Image (cartoon, rainbow, N blue to C red):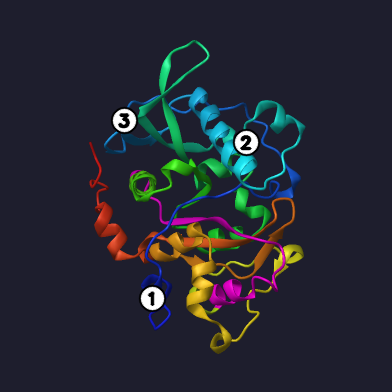
Amino acid sequence: MRQGLFSPRKLVRKFTPAMRPGAAMANGQRPTAALRTPVKTGETLGRIGSLEVRMARNFKEVKKAQRLRYQVFYEEMSAIADAHTLATRRDADPFDAYCDHLLVVDHASLKRNKLGRLKPEIVGTYRILRQEVANRHSGFYTAAEYDIQSLIDANPDKRFMELGRSCVLKPYRNKKTVELLWHGIWSYVLRHNIDVMLGCASIEGTNPDALAGQLSFLHHNARAPEQWRVRAVQDRYVEMNRMAADEINSKEALRALPPLVKGYLRLGAFIGDGAVIDHQFGTTDVLIIMPVSELNTRYVNYYGADASRYSS
């Protein structure tokens, strides 16, 4: 898959997830279901030293994940908060009601809650939405930017899963935390028999001409083959093929790509057709498509075919 001198798999060597909030929900709709409390479980998906990866056990932990997202997206990065977000200091949207929330918690960093009890700090998170759950509500978040339904309809025998709202506290943006997050995702994929992962990732900036090198690099080196290709919605489509392949400084373009995008490429991800400008967040979004059957075998072997590498 995509072998060659400038294969992203050969050029990329490290990655750090740092997803930011995205566009409004598809069709302007909002879920009407009450907030779902995740199933309470004490199960650990993986552990390295004091760091543990697991799913959120209750809505209190979901709120802590939302506060972490606010800290990263709004205080550290450039997202613009509305009055409600400013008042609550939580990055929250209706999708949180029925998504699962993957957490990395640090048992060596204890924070007092409102009752004065010491609790391990949540230092990383990923939001996960399975197809069957999305179908019961208002669909996938990504559908606001890309025509993913066409891909789903073309693969009725496959189970899709959306990844989003990923962030890690700055002091924890290291190999150990990232590996735990991906170990948790891999465990989740195996448990729920997921066939395809997808979601949006962002490049800072809203001028596609200024991002021509990065967008063109992705177009020429990582664009999804026809059977996996998804196009940005028509009224938001931005051409990614802005430079001829022989005009691109591939190493420079790759170096400029966000760590999250490079991480997905390293795993073997495909990139959708067309970018989407998000002026509210000052970013240009690209679609990530990761069929499990196409994942880099080094990644699968590293974490284990049964996700046993960091099992406790």
x and y percentages locating residue 24 in the rendered image: 71, 47
Residue bearing the label numbered 3: 43
Q: Secondary structure at mark 1?
A: loop
- The kind of residue on which mark 3 rests is Glu
Q: Residue at x 36, y 26 (%)?
A: 41
Q: Secondary structure at mark 2?
A: loop
- The kind of residue on which mark 1 rests is Met
x and y percentages locating residue 295 in the rendered image: 36, 63
Q: Are marks 3 and 2 in contact (CB under 8 Å)?
A: no
Q: Which residues are magenta?
A: 191-219
Which label's residue is closer to the chain start, 2 or 1?
Answer: 1
- How many discs appear? 3
Q: Quadrant of the N terminus?
A: bottom left
Nearer the camera: disc 2 or disc 1: 2
Magenta span includes 260: no
Residue bearing the label numbered 1: 1
Q: Where on the picture, by quarter, is residue 269?
A: bottom left
